[in-house]
Image: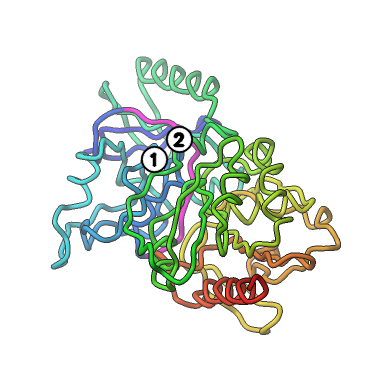
């Protein structure tokens, strides 16, 4: 039964069935092309205030387990999918639908996600709103909804709400997701690593701990650079997170510049990669179609090999803005956008994608090991 409508800011409508919490949600619609890992995706803090649309037609078949959450809570606004599958897996303790409802997350299923994806690819990123239908006499013809007079008024009201919607941006969205992870770190580990937390995924922390790092999460508020330097860390990670990097950069690039010039090894991931590049002199621009999913090919310039990567970003560098002291290390095979950089003057490198492979392949685990190698070299020079 079609009891819910998805309305885009350009007036395009899709009917479907309510899943999760029955209610209304609003946010930028972002499609992800991964065929697995929906629990990782939904709990990724980088999706704060966005509506996640899954292009894979069947979602929910392995249910929800106790291992794959990337944050303590869900920051996404809602979810869109074609078919909600029944759960059948020994590690599952609850179905996706029940979990969404318990998590107060609004969703819609039964949507022609292929048509929606093609629409977004053609017309660019858009905000959308999911809302229950509270009226009858609704039919759907060729993916275009036709309504009675009452329904038309409701849709107009939703479009007006979309026009007024102002997403959280700048450092305020970082403040919303920062320090949102629980973990146990061995205080006697080999390496002491400060993580500037813009909305870090739990799996990134796990990979660092596995490699012998004692982790301390640092909120990117005023003066965080001096706090980090006072810790005397062996390395620094600039984490992933949501938002517009140019807006967030206004509040943090001065601090990042301080830690870069300290010559402590730095690894940047996704948002951290973008903020690092902005600090070094580059500019970012919003993509017409973001890269989201666990099947994105990236060319490694130095090894002359292709890596299959997990990605989640809607901004890229303007190539013409990259300064001469920055070397490009990785390039997208989809659109030739810059996926990795390395500073020539400092032990600093970063990637646009997610080497922690959650979800995804293990092709890029070596980046964490490269970071550890930089730490080892730094400690030897400090002796």
Look at the numbered disc 1 and give the secondary structure of its residue.
loop
Task: Name above or below for residue 28 compared with residue 164.
Answer: below
Q: Is residue 29 magenta?
A: yes
Residue 287 position within the rendered picture, expressed as x and y whole percent measured from the top left: 65, 49
Look at the numbered disc 2 and give the secondary structure of its residue.
helix
- Please tell me which residue is depicted at 58% across the width and 49% down the height of the picture: 230
Residue 82 position within the rendered picture, expressed as x and y whole percent measured from the top left: 33, 51
Task: Name above or below for residue 129 compared with residue 277.
Answer: above
- Please tell me which residue is depicted at 44% across the width and 34% down the height of the picture: 13
The residue to which callout 1 is attached is: 75
Left/right of residue 87 with respect to residue 4 in the rendered view: left
Q: Is residue 51 visible?
A: yes
- Residue 176 numbered tag: 2
- Of residue 82 and residue 60, the one placed in the foreground of this image is 60
Left/right of residue 267 with respect to residue 324 in the rendered view: left
Q: Residue furthest right?
A: 324
Q: Which residues are magenta?
A: 24-35
Q: Quadrant of residue 234?
A: bottom right
- Residue 198 numbered tag: none
Task: Name above or below for residue 235 compared with residue 171.
Answer: below
- Of residue 253 and residue 152, the one placed in the foreground of this image is 253
Residue 232 position within the rendered picture, expressed as x and y whole percent measured from the top left: 57, 57
- Of residue 178 and residue 96, the one placed in the foreground of this image is 178
- Please tell me which residue is depicted at 61% across the width and 51% down the height of the picture: 229
Cβ–Cβ under 8 Å for marks 2 and 1: yes
Q: Give the spatial CA distance, label 2 vs label 1.
A: 9 Å
């Amino acid at each position: 039964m079609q009891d819910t409508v998805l309305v885009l800011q350009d007036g395009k409508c899709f009917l479907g069935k309510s899943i999760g919490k029955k209610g209304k949600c609003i946010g930028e619609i972002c499609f992800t092309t991964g065929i697995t890992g929906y629990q990782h995706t939904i709990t990724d803090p980088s999706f704060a205030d966005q509506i996640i649309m899954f292009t894979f037609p069947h979602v929910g078949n392995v249910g929800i387990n106790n291992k794959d959450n990337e944050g303590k809570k869900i920051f996404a606004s809602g979810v869109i999918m074609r078919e909600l599958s029944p759960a059948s897996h020994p590690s599952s303790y609850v179905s996706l639908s029940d979990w969404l409802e318990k998590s107060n997350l609004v969703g819609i299923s039964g949507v022609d996600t292929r048509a929606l994806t093609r629409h977004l690819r053609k017309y660019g990123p858009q905000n959308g709103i999911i809302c229950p239908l509270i009226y009858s006499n609704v039919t759907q013809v060729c993916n275009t909804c036709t309504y009675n007079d009452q329904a038309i008024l409701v849709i107009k009201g939703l479009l007006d709400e979309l026009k007024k919607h102002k997403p959280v941006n700048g450092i305020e969205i970082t403040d919303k997701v920062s320090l949102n992870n629980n973990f146990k770190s061995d205080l006697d580990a080999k390496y002491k690593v400060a993580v500037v937390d813009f909305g870090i995924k739990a799996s990134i922390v796990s990979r660092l701990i596995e490699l012998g790092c004692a982790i301390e999460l640092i909120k990117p508020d005023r003066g965080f650079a001096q706090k980090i330097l006072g810790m005397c860390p062996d390395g620094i990670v600039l984490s992933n997170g949501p938002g517009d990097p140019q807006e967030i950069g206004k509040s943090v690039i001065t601090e990042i510049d301080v830690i870069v010039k300290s010559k402590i090894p730095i690894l940047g991931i996704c948002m951290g990669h973008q903020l690092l590049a902005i600090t070094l002199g580059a500019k970012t621009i919003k993509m017409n179609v973001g890269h989201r999913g666990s099947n994105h090919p990236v060319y490694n310039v130095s090894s002359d090999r292709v890596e299959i990567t997990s990605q989640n970003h809607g901004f890229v560098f303007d190539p013409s803005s990259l300064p001469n002291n920055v070397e490009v290390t990785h390039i997208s095979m989809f659109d030739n956008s810059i996926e990795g950089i390395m500073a020539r003057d400092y032990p600093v490198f970063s990637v646009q994608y997610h080497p922690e492979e959650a979800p995804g392949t293990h092709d890029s685990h070596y980046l964490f090991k490269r970071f550890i190698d930089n730490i080892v070299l730094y400690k030897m020079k400090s002796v």
